[in-house]
Amino acid sequence: MTTEAIHDSHEHDHHDHKMTGIKRWLFTTNHKDIGTLYLWFAFIMLLFGGALAMLIRAELFQPGLQFVEPDFFNQLTTVHGLIMVFGAIMPAFTGFANWMIPMMIGAPDMALPRMNNWSFWILPFAFAILISSFFMDSGAPNFGWTFYAPLSTTYSNGSTAFFVFAVHIMGISSIMGAINVIVTIMNMRAPGMTYMKMPLFVWTFFITAYLLIAVMPVLAGVVTMVLTDTYFGTSFFDAAGGGDPVMFQHIFWFFGHPEVYIMILPAFGIVSTIIPTFARKKLFGYSSMVYATASIAFLSFIVWAHHMFTTGMPLAGELFFMYCTMLIAVPTGVKVFNWVATMWRGAMTFELPMLFSIAFVILFTIGGFSGLMLALTPVDFQYHDTYFVVAHFHYVLVTGSLFSIYAGAYYWLPKWTGHMFSERLGKAHFWCSLISVNILFFPMHFLGLAGMPRRIPDYALQFADFNKWVSIGGFAFGLSQLIFLAVVIQCIRGGKKAEANPWEAEEGLEWSVPSPAPYHTFETPPKID
Amino acid sequence: MTEQHQQNINKSVKKLTLIVCAMFGFGFALVPLYDVFCDITGLNGKTSNQAASVNENGVDESRLITVQFISHLSKGIPWQFEPMVKEIKVHPGETKLVKFYAKNDAARDIVGQAVPSVSPGQAAVYFQKIECFCFNQQPLKASEDVEMALQFYVDTELPEEVNTITLSYTLYDITGKVES
Ligand SMILES: [Cu+2]
């Protein structure tokens, strides 16, 4: 070590010094600061992506074309999807990882603090590039977030290069974040914190990080192929030059299916932390939860073609992917069983984090069931590319992932801010969201079964009534999220002082430090028994 | 943080970076892997790009297979392109000759390339072309037209359950690629 480094680490021991103003946030290497940045960024992206969804629902309020041109409508659905997946859900989980993992395993910080700063600060640039394409002559990408070739190659508009570079940067950011999570968990655990003693929250992020490392590079590869096909005359996906557009779907979904577990496994972790606290029981079947998570992650690599049943596969292929997909219901069922068993005969109370967690368990299960229906090859031919699919993945992503994020945010807000939030306002957020989200997404099941196709700005008259309900639910759900903003701002500015362990949680090192959590925690590792 | 600790961290970072690079490579390796896989299984309905030799297994008169021909024009190619017979019946092993008509309606010279695809995909490996216009590029001067030949037979090993084979040709404008 150089003298400078020694000096550095010496200073590091005593201070609670931090830079002030904008510099603190730009140059911070503190895991809590970076976690906060990630969470705010994710929330801003959620509002932006939500605004796009409001435009979509306004257009679909009535049949016919009212507000937007079909091409712009396609841009809206595309960017809405990209923003929600890569800008809202994934950064929000990375924010949780940053804030909580070091505190939960008794580490002073993440293992690679400087890389941590980078992995956050390249994200705003990625989304600036993506969003700026709205203001270009050609408009934003319009081929759907799944960017199927040849829509994204032969038929794409002028902003494809911006899309590709934006996805590259998002990918690099997630990969760096994932490396940081794995290295931290492998090397920074407090003495005595064995793998099987880690909170399930940490386990799910550990496994998710491995999924990220395995599939984000494949995504980077496939967007690169789209780039060279579009601009440099290669023919990976162009049949005229010996390529194959169906291969695009294979490579994309090899990334795409593990990606959906990247967005749900951390949710499992959050909910598995919250339910035991408010049921006042230990988590039922801890080790089975770990193994279930690992087997879901493993299975996610061999089911990708269930997105492609209608592309013309041999029967054997369709059966293989159908059975493998349905197999995932087993470990997922284990999880749902364990959550219910944890609540069974518990001394339950229904504070906000618990309300969101229970809503998660029920509504995520509905999303899981519609997923099972979609996994059945023969019926998928009917459901494919209809609103049934839209209903399915919004149930798992909104009432699944997003609700778990809210549950986690309410659970740890006292730890983050040092204040209790307004339970009344929070309950308003919960009930408004819960009711409106079901008005928003439940009728979509019926629309899909009746044959309404997704990604179309107009529809047949018989779908008009349901679409009106869906749109009303959509506007209400969108507005309800502003209540959350109000709760958070109020909670940051003041409120009842939070105790170190406001929920009387039985487990979790994070509750052993005062609220708000000091800027540096566990500089000397805690004792684990 | 001890020196040993820092070394462990560096080691993990190196290993993980290696996985990332390997997976990036794997994404591209999927391209040839997919081709090999499809060659073996006929998964994507691609037929062989090489001329098959003449059938030596005799003719199976007990079966009669319907072969349908369809054609597509890819975006922006101003040609007419159609099979001159839409459908014929053949015994497995029997060699047949069919013709496709193509005409360049544009006022400029265009090089076309027809790409075949067979449905159901599992029949692709049994569809043998002795001679096909799709083996070559097809340059047509402005307003020129041509009749293009396809000579083929269906292999006698064709699975029992396949009674109809559809051969689809998509015609692409490759003038730009030929010039560059
Ligand atoms: Cu999937």
Image (cartoon, helix red, strand yellow):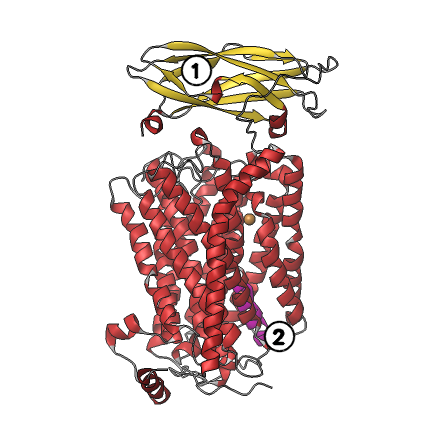
Query: Residue sitting at 38 percent across and 52 percent down?
Result: A167
Q: Determine which residue is flagged by label 2.
A: A196
Q: Position of residue A209 (x, y in %)?
A: 50, 63
Q: Is residue A374 above or below residue A187?
A: above
Residue placed most toward the observer, A81 or A66: A81
Give the amino acid at mark 2.
Met
Tell which tag, 1 or 2, sits nearer the viewer. 1
Q: Position of residue A520 (x, y in %)?
A: 39, 83
Per the rendered image, the range of residues in magenta is A266-282
Q: Is residue A434 above or below residue A165?
A: below
Q: Determine which residue is flagged by label 1.
A: B81
Position of A22 compared to A300: left or right?
left
Res. A293 image quadrant: bottom right
Res. A375 image quadrant: top right
The chain that hosts pointer 1 is B
Circles 1 and 2: CB distance less than 8 Å? no
Position of B155 compared to A518: left or right?
right
Give the amino acid at mark 1.
Phe
Q: Position of residue B139 (x, y in %)?
A: 37, 17
Query: Residue sitting at 60 percent across and 49 percent down?
Result: A302
Q: Is residue A475 magenta?
A: no
Q: For numbered disc 1, what is the local secondary structure?
A: strand
Q: For numbered disc 2, what is the local secondary structure?
A: helix
Position of A425 compared to A140: left or right?
right
Do we see residue B119 in this rendering?
yes
Residue extending farthest to the right is B62
